[in-house]
Image (spheres, grey):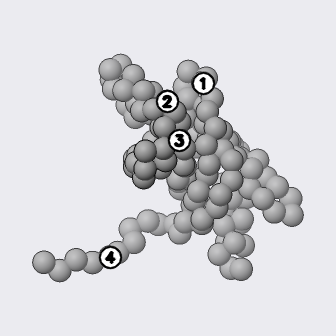
Amino acid sequence: MLMYNVELRRHPRLDVDIPVGVVDTEGVARAGRLINLSAEGVLLAGDSQFYHYLVRAQERRKQEKSGPVEAVVMFTLPGDSPCFYQVQCRMVHTRRLSQHLFHIGFKIIAFDKGKIADLELFLRQQFAS
C-alpha cells in the first residue's frame, strides 16, 4: 500500500511554549501550556488534572447531547508589544503522551474583535524570521 505524508492543514503551526488559561462553559478555570498555534487552532499541554477536567466536561456534554466541549482559551503572545488573546475554541482531539502529560487540540471558532488580524500578523512575522 502506498502512503502519502500530506499536510492537510490550511495554516502552518508555530511551536511555542507559553502559559495558557482555559475556562469551560461552567466558568471553571484551569492552567496549562500552549505548545503550538495556527490561525485556526491551538494545541495545549497539561497534566492529568487538566486532561480529566476537559474529559469530564466532554462526558457531561455528551450526556446532555449538547455537542463537543467548548472553552475560552486565554494567552499572551510575546514580542515587542505583547498581545493578550481570548479565543472561543472547540475541543477536537486528545492524546496521552505519558502518565502525566496530555495534549489537547482545539479549533478556534471565535476571536475577540480585530484579534484575528493581529494573530495572523504575528504568525507571518514568526515564520519569516
Residue at the extreme right? 80
Q: Amino acid at mark 1?
A: Val
Label 1 vs label 3: CA separation? 16 Å
Q: Residue at x 66, y 67 (%)?
A: 123
Q: Secondary structure at mark 1?
A: loop
The tag on residue 53 is 2
Viewer-proximal residue, 25 or 20? 20
Label 4 vs label 3: CA separation? 30 Å
The tag on residue 47 is 3
Callout 2 touching callout 4 (CB < 8 Å):
no
Viewer-proximal residue, 9 or 29? 29
Q: Residue at x 72, y 65 (%)?
A: 122
The tag on residue 55 is none
Q: Amino acid at mark 2?
A: Tyr
Label 4 belongs to which residue? 5
Label 2 vs label 3: CA separation? 10 Å
* 9 relative to 66, above or below: below
Left or right of residue 101, residue 33 in this image = right
Pointer 1 or 4: first along the chain: 4
Pointer 2 or 4: first along the chain: 4
> Is residue 104 among what the camera can see?
no
Q: Secondary structure at mark 4?
A: loop
The tag on residue 28 is 1
Pointer 1 or 2: first along the chain: 1
Q: Residue at x 69, y 72 (%)?
A: 126
Callout 1 touching callout 2 (CB < 8 Å):
yes
